[in-house]
Structure formats: C-alpha cells, structure tokens
Amino acid sequence: NGKIALITGASSGIGAATATRLAEAGVTVGLAARRTDRLDALKADIAERGGNALAIEMDVVDPASVEAGVRALVDACGSIDILVNNAGLMPLSDIDQFKTDEWHRMVDVNVKGLLNTTAAVLPQMIRQHAGHIFNTSSIAGRKIFKGLSVYCATKHAVTAFSDGLRMEVGQKHNIRVTCIQPGAVATELYDRITDPGYRKQMDDLARQMTFLQGADIAATILFALQAPGHVNVAELFVLPTEQGW
Ligand code: NJP
C-alpha cells in the first residue's frame, strides 16, 4: 500500500512477525533493533517474499541512535506513516531481591525508549498531518502481577502515555494511536528471565496453555491499520483463549 513503517524491536518475536505481516501487505518496513545480523536476515527473508525492508541499527535508549535511525528511514523513503513502538524487556524478580539494574533497564527501554522514538518520529507525522502509532503495552499495563511489579509499572506508563498521546495528537494532527495489550506470547522475552524460580514458573505456564504467537499480534495490528481513516482502534487487548485474566 506504499506506506512506510518504523518497527522497533524488529529483530525477534512480535516485532519481527509484525514486520513480516506488514511487508506482505505492501508496507515498506524499517527494521530497528541492536542485533543487526537478525535484521539483515529478516530483511533478506522479506525481500525473498517480494517485500521491501531496511535494516536500521538502533538502541532506543540512546536518543542520538534513535534520531539517526529515523533520519536514515526518512532520507531513504521520504516519510514515516506508521510507528510500532515494540522494543521491550521483562526480567522478573521480587522487589526485595533488589535487582535494581534490571529495574532501571526496564524503565530505560520500555518507557524512555518509547518516548525517544515517539519524539523523533512525531514531528514527521505532524508535518504530514497523518500517521498511526502503535505502542506495545501489555496485560501488565492493566493489572499487577507478583514478580512483575516494575514491568507492570513501565507498561502502565505506556498505557497512560498512549491515552494522553491519542488525546493530544488525534484530532489536532490526524494521528491514530493504538495501545496493544497482549497476554502471553511465545517469544524470546521469557529467555531473559534470570531468576530461576520465575523462569520455572513461566516454563510451567507455557506447558499448561497455548501461548499466542507473534503472528497473532501482527494480525491484529494489521486489522487496526486497515480500518478506515476515521476509525481509531484505540486498544488491542489480545489474550490466549486459556489465559482469561
Ligand atoms: O520479546 P522479544 P517480544 N534498543 O524478546 C528489542 C511486549 N509484550 O517480542 O536490540 C532497541 O522477542 C530486541 O532487539 P535487540 C514486550 O514487553 C510481550 O515478546 O536486537 N531494541 C527485540 O527485538 C515488548 O515490549 C509479551 O536485542 C531493543 C525486542 O526488543 C514487546 O511485547 C506480552 C532494546 C524484544 O523481543 C515485544 O516483545 C506482553 C534496545 N535497547 C507484552 N532492548 C509476551 N511475549 O508474552 C530490547 O503483554 N530491544
């Protein structure tokens, strides 16, 4: 459809699946993450299926890296119509373990990273008087889970910011904002849990129920994207059938 998207966290999981799905729908996808080997492989895979992709090395925590990546995409393609703010991490631990490095890392990537990319892309969308921003929050952006307190705090921040963003840029600048709130999705997110107890708990959960796949979330993103321009699918709350909530 000739649109241009920037997708953060495109090197795995939900981001990679979304890139593949959007490219199939004719969107040129800017693949942003730190692991460029993964991005190059995905770019080649998309090209093989007849799609267009660019690999963009980007650390969302570093504003200079984000600005350079956004500039590279605009220089190459002329616009950015879609921003998928998807990069994130979820190391689990109890608060009294004081894994403060992991707390800070979650705040840096899940919250500040999302603000960095939004600040870098929004002026372009405002100039275009059009755009669609997807922010990946979580079921943890609606309720609190034990062991996920800091993660929940970051995702509540994403949900809150998405509501504010929609209020401030929706009508004034013709920009749609969709907040994505997935339940359990089978991705590498769980591989980075360092606490053995929570790691086991998550492995047990994966045995008890069928998790969503990244492609399931990608399909709902495409649904919101393809809605007529006057329709803003404000939230995508998507759970495994067996998860309830
Ligand atoms: O996880 P994973 P998901 N700068 O680990 C990137 C949310 N979510 O797909 O830089 C730039 O496969 C990293 O890239 P790299 C979750 O909170 C998930 O599940 O190369 N990118 C990788 O591509 C997150 O917001 C579930 O290491 C950075 C990506 O982030 C989103 O879904 C449930 C980065 C992570 O991919 C995607 O996560 C839910 C940085 N500094 C919400 N740091 C679920 N899976 O169950 C990391 O409710 N990345």
Image: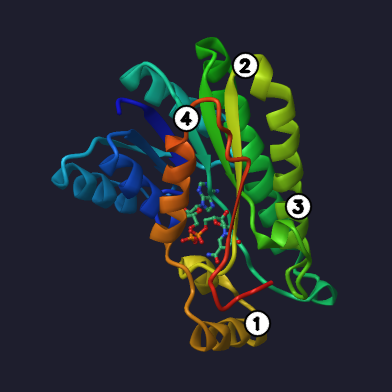
Looking at the image, tell me whether mark 3 or mark 4 is earlier in sequence order.
3
**Circles 2 and 1: CB distance less than 8 Å?**
no
60, above or below 9, in the image: above
Which quadrant of the structure image shows residue 105?
Answer: bottom right
Q: Between tags 2 and 4, which lies in front?
A: 4
Residue at numbered disc 2 = 173
Looking at the image, tell me whether mark 1 or mark 3 is earlier in sequence order.
3
- Residue 126 x, y percent position in the rendering: 58, 15
Residue at numbered disc 1 = 198
How crowded pointer 2 is (Cα within 10 Å; few <14, some 14-19, many 20+) is rated as some
Report the Cα–Cα distance between label 3 and label 4: 28 Å
Image disc number at residue 156? 3
- Residue 28 x, y percent position in the rendering: 31, 32
Looking at the image, tell me whether mark 2 or mark 4 is earlier in sequence order.
2
Report the Cα–Cα distance between label 2 and label 4: 17 Å
Q: Between tags 4 and 1, which lies in front?
A: 4
**Circles 4 and 1: CB distance less than 8 Å?**
no
Q: 71 left or right of 177?
A: left
Looking at the image, tell me whether mark 2 or mark 1 is earlier in sequence order.
2
**Circles 1 and 3: CB distance less than 8 Å?**
no
Give the residue type at disc 3: His
Residue at numbered disc 4 = 228
**Circles 2 and 4: CB distance less than 8 Å?**
no
Q: 46 left or right of 61?
A: left
Report the Cα–Cα distance between label 1 and label 3: 21 Å
Looking at the image, tell me whether mark 4 or mark 1 is earlier in sequence order.
1
Q: Between tags 1 and 3, which lies in front?
A: 3
Q: 226 left or right of 244?
A: left
